[in-house]
C-alpha cells in the first residue's frame, strides 16, 4: 500500500462522494434516510474510495452505478473525524477525482477507529447520483 | 454453546456415544434450530452475503473472506439464547461484516474484521452506550451484550 498524504490543496468545503453500492448501505430506522454507519470503513486496506464531486465524476459514476445513491461528506468532515484525504487518480478506474480517506488518528480496527468512521458517516447526506 | 454452528472438534464433543439411527440424529439437529429459530436465519444470511460478495473496482472489495465468515459463525456459536430478534447482516468494504441485533430502543452491533477482531457497539436510541474490543471466542461478553440489548442485564 503506498504511503498516503493529505492533499492540503483541497478546500475544506470540497464535497466527496461515496457510492452506496448496496441497498443495506442506506438505513431508515429511527429517522430519515441516511448512510449506514459503516460506509466509511474498510476492513482490509483501511482506505475508503471517494470521488471529488464534479459533473464529470458523477457522469462516469452514473454509467457504472446507475440508479445508485451517494453519501456526501466534506473534506472538513473527514479531517474533523481523524481522516486524511489523499489523491489517488490511479485507483479510480478512469473516473476523475478519485481520493482515498484514511483514518490516521485511531489504531486500526479499534473501537476508536469505528467511532471515527461512524462520526464521519453521521455528517453525510444522501443524494441520487 | 449451540453445537449446530460449532467447528469440527466441538461437534465431536457433543456427539452422543450411544448408537443412534440416522433419522434420530437428523431430528436432534433439526430441534436445535427449532429451539433457536433466529440461528437458522442468521446462518442463511451469512451464506447469502458470502455468495453475493463482489469486488467493485474504484469503490471497494465487498468479497467476504472465508476468515470473516468463520469468525461470525464462531461468534454465533457462543450465543446460548433461544429467543432473539432476527439479526441483520451487512457486508462492509474490505470484507468485514456488521451484525446487528435490534431489540426496541437497544442494539447490539458487532463489526467483524477479516483479521478476527470484533468491535462491539451497544447502542441505546441510536447513541453509543458502550463499546468494546472482542474476539469471536469471548462468549461471556457476547452473551452479556445480547442480554443487555434485551433489557435483561
Image (tube, coloured by chain):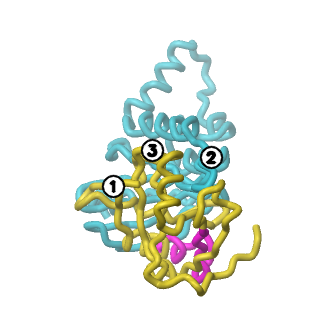
In the rendered image, which residue does mark 2 sit on? B55
Question: In what quadrant of the picture does the C terminus of chain A appear?
Answer: bottom left
Q: Does B3 appear in magenta?
A: no
Viewer-side residue, B54 vs B91: B54
Chain with colour yellow in the figure: A
> In the structure shown, which secondary structural element does the residue marked by tag 2 occupy?
strand
**Real-space Cα separation, disc 3 to disc 2, in angstroms:** 17 Å
Q: Are marks 3 and 2 on the same chain?
A: no
Q: Chain of mark 1?
A: A
Percent across and percent down for residue B83 are 33, 43
In the rendered image, which residue does mark 1 sit on? A27
> In the structure shown, which secondary structural element does the residue marked by tag 1 occupy?
strand
Marks 1/3 in contact by CB < 8 Å: the verdict is no
Closer to viewer: mark 1 or mark 3: 3
Q: Chain of mark 2?
A: B
Give the residues drawn in magenta, as a range: A99-115
**Real-space Cα separation, disc 1 to disc 3, in angstroms:** 19 Å
What is the crowding at mark 2: few (fewer than 14 residues within 10 Å), some, or many (at least 20)? Answer: some
> In the structure shown, which secondary structural element does the residue marked by tag 3 occupy?
loop
Chain with colour cyan in the figure: B
In the displayed structure, would residue B83 be above or below residue A110?
Answer: above
In the rendered image, which residue does mark 3 sit on? A66
Viewer-side residue, B29 vs B66: B66
Q: Does A110 appear in magenta?
A: yes
In the displayed structure, would residue B47 be above or below residue A52?
Answer: above
Q: Quick check: can you spot residue B136?
A: no
Amino acid at each position: 500500500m503506498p504511503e498516503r498524504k493529505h492533499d492540503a490543496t483541497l478546500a475544506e468545503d470540497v464535497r466527496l462522494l461515496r457510492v452506496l453500492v448496496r441497498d443495506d448501505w442506506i438505513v431508515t430506522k429511527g429517522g430519515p434516510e441516511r448512510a449506514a454507519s459503516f460506509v466509511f470503513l474498510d476492513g482490509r486496506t483501511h482506505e475508503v474510495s471517494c470521488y471529488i464531486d464534479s459533473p464529470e465524476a458523477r457522469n462516469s459514476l452514473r454509467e457504472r452505478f446507475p440508479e445508485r445513491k451517494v453519501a456526501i461528506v466534506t473534506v472538513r468532515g473527514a479531517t474533523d473525524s481523524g481522516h486524511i484525504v489523499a489523491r489517488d487518480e490511479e485507483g479510480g478506474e478512469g473516473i476523475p477525482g478519485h481520493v482515498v480517506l484514511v483514518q490516521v488518528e485511531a489504531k486500526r480496527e479499534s473501537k476508536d477507529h469505528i467511532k471515527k468512521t461512524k462520526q464521519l458517516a453521521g455528517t453525510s447526506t444522501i443524494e441520487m447520483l | 454453546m449451540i453445537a449446530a454452528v460449532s467447528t469440527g472438534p466441538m461437534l465431536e464433543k457433543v456427539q452422543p456415544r450411544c448408537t443412534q439411527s440416522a433419522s434420530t440424529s437428523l431430528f436432534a439437529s433439526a430441534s436445535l434450530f427449532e429451539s433457536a429459530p433466529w440461528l437458522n436465519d442468521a446462518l442463511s444470511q451469512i451464506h447469502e452475503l458470502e455468495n453475493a460478495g463482489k469486488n467493485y473496482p474504484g469503490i471497494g472489495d465487498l468479497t467476504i473472506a472465508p476468515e470473516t465468515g468463520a469468525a461470525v459463525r464462531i461468534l454465533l456459536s457462543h450465543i446460548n439464547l433461544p429467543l432473539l430478534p432476527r439479526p441483520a447482516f451487512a457486508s462492509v468494504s474490505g470484507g468485514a461484516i456488521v451484525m446487528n441485533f435490534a431489540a426496541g430502543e437497544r442494539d447490539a452491533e458487532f463489526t467483524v474484521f477479516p483479521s478476527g477482531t470484533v468491535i462491539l457497539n451497544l447502542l441505546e436510541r441510536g447513541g453509543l452506550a458502550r463499546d468494546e474490543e472482542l474476539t469471536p471466542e469471548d462468549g461471556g461478553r457476547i452473551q452479556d451484550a445480547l442480554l443487555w440489548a434485551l433489557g435483561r442485564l
